[in-house]
Amino acid sequence: MNKNDSYQRLPGNGKSPETSLLQVEDLNAWYGAAHILHGVSLTVGRGEVVALMGRNGAGKSTTLKSIAGLVDRTQGSVRFQGRRIDGQPPYRIARAGLGYVPEDRRIFTDLTVRENLEVGRQPPRRWQDGQSVPLWTPERLFALFPNLGEMPDRLGGRMSGGEQQMLTVARTLMGQPCLVLLDEPSEGVAPLIVQQMARTISELKAQGLGILLSEQNLPFAQAVADRACVLEQGRIVHTGPMAGLTVF
Ligand code: ADP
Ligand code: MG
């Protein structure tokens, strides 16, 4: 079965004939009185990688945080596997199978690599159609991130920024997500880590996960993404195939 075809035909909720893994419609977000997102709409399907592109301050992180339930004041709808998740607390959104990797790597510096992974562990999960979501274990993650496999007992605080970045992604995968939000995975890490991150994203895609990543690095986005959504001042100004995007 072609994974890219399957998500369009998941049972809908009656309102929308096509149900993607993630459907964001007319999302608005505020910090205090500052209106940051203005009617953002986007979708991510199973096995699809969507890059949210835009300059500093465009609203990329705010979009991901809003989806993850971390912005206090939002309006609009966010559907995940056909169910509304907007307005739910972050822990419920995470438990529904939506993984979020923030910009600042929030690993536990006084826990080891293996302990950090255990903190993220959640039970196995099924897709809406009943199929099992591929199960992540520390062993599988160590195969995916060989650097981490070489240092299972290293304290988080004694790792490089890039290694911490990988550990954050690996810990999120221990939550067995169906979709992962990645906030600027290539930012501030060494080229070798960027390459490994790109391989990881391709692997997740191959497993049928959906990925929404925010990026300012066009070559990186071109290497991994199927589609691009371009944000400018909190508005989506372009959506289309990644291949067609040369500037943003
Ligand atoms: P990006 O991730 O694209 O760089 P952000 O979503 O971080 O953009 O920021 C979008 C806008 O929201 C910017 O103008 C930024 O200054 C503002 N902003 C971000 N976080 C906060 C916050 N916690 N409080 C107030 N304003 C914020
Ligand atoms: Mg940001």
Image (cartoon, rainbow, N blue to C red):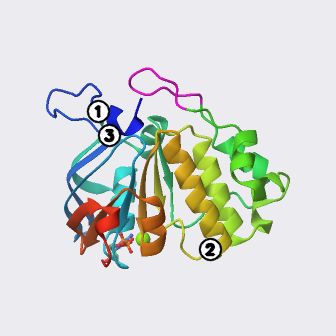
| Residue drawn at the location 80% of the way across and 51% of the way down | 149
Task: Give how far apart the Cα atoms at labels 1 and 3 are.
Answer: 9 Å
Question: Could you tell me the amino acid type at mark 1?
Answer: Gly
Question: Could you tell me the amino acid type at mark 2?
Answer: Val
Which quarter of the picture shows residue 70?
bottom left
Q: Is residue 202 visible?
A: yes
Disc 1 residue lies near ligand 1 with CB under 8 A = no
Question: Could you tell me the amino acid type at mark 3?
Answer: Ile
Residue that carries the numbered disc 1 in the rendered image: 82
Disc 2 residue lies near ligand 2 with CB under 8 A = no
User: Is 76 located above or below residue 136 in the figure?
Assistant: below
Q: Position of residue 150 (x, y in %)?
A: 84, 55
Mark 1 secondary-structure assignment: loop
Q: Which mark is residue 85?
A: 3
State which mark lies toward you, 2 or 3.
2
Sequence order check: which comes first, mark 2 or mark 1? 1
Mark 2 secondary-structure assignment: loop
User: Is 9 located above or below residue 242 in the figure?
Assistant: above
Relative to residue 229, is residue 143 drawn left or right? Answer: right
Q: Which span is picked out in magenta?
A: 123-133
